[in-house]
Amino acid sequence: MNEPSSRPAIARIWRGRVRRERADEYEAYNFEAGIRPLIEKAVGVQTFREDREGETEFVTISYWPSLEAMTALTGAAPTNVHHLLLDPEFLIELPQSVQILKLRQAYGRTG
């Protein structure tokens, strides 16, 4: 687990969409299978949810002290997605990559 004093330098952004009627079920599953283990490895994690008429989009942003620390999660290219076991059952389409951004500045309370 990263020390609380570790400063985030990298943000890893994952997006996934599920059918609206399965959103609550996926949110609970995603937390247990994906987010909870991520909390132990990343400097910080934020989750977002947008309910739309027929689908729900989930966004997870994890923060890392370096690109090397982040790639240790996937063991591969930084933008590779680590799909959860039941993602093919829940997700409308499997994301092909994640977005990697360098954190430049943070202002105010962000989490």
Image (tube, rainbow, N blue to C red):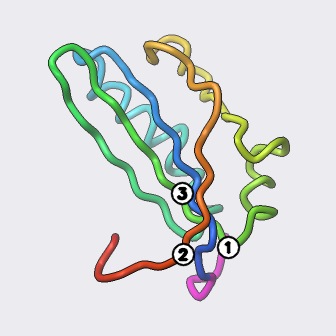
Q: Earlier in the sequence, mark 2 or mark 1?
A: 1
Name the foreground residue: 104 vs 25. Answer: 104
Q: Quadrant of the C terminus?
A: bottom left
Q: Which residues are magenta?
A: 1-6
| Mark carried by residue 62 | 3
Residue 23 sits inside the magenta stretch: no
| Above or below, comparing residue 98 to residue 108 in the picture | above
| Main SS class of the magenta portion in the image | loop
Q: Reading the chain from its start, which is encountered first: label 3 or label 2? A: 3
Considering every residue shown, the one lying at the far left of the view is 53
Residue type at tag 2: Arg
Callout 2: 10 Å neighbours few (<14), some, many (20+)? few
Q: What's the CA distance linking mark 2 and mark 1?
A: 12 Å
> Residues under labels 3 and 2: Cα distance?
15 Å
The answer for how far apart the CA atoms under marks 1 and 3 are is 10 Å
User: Residue 86 at x, y = what percent?
Assistant: 55, 19
Give amino acid for label 1.
Pro
Q: Which residue is mark 2?
A: 104
Q: Residue at x 54, y 41 (%)?
A: 34
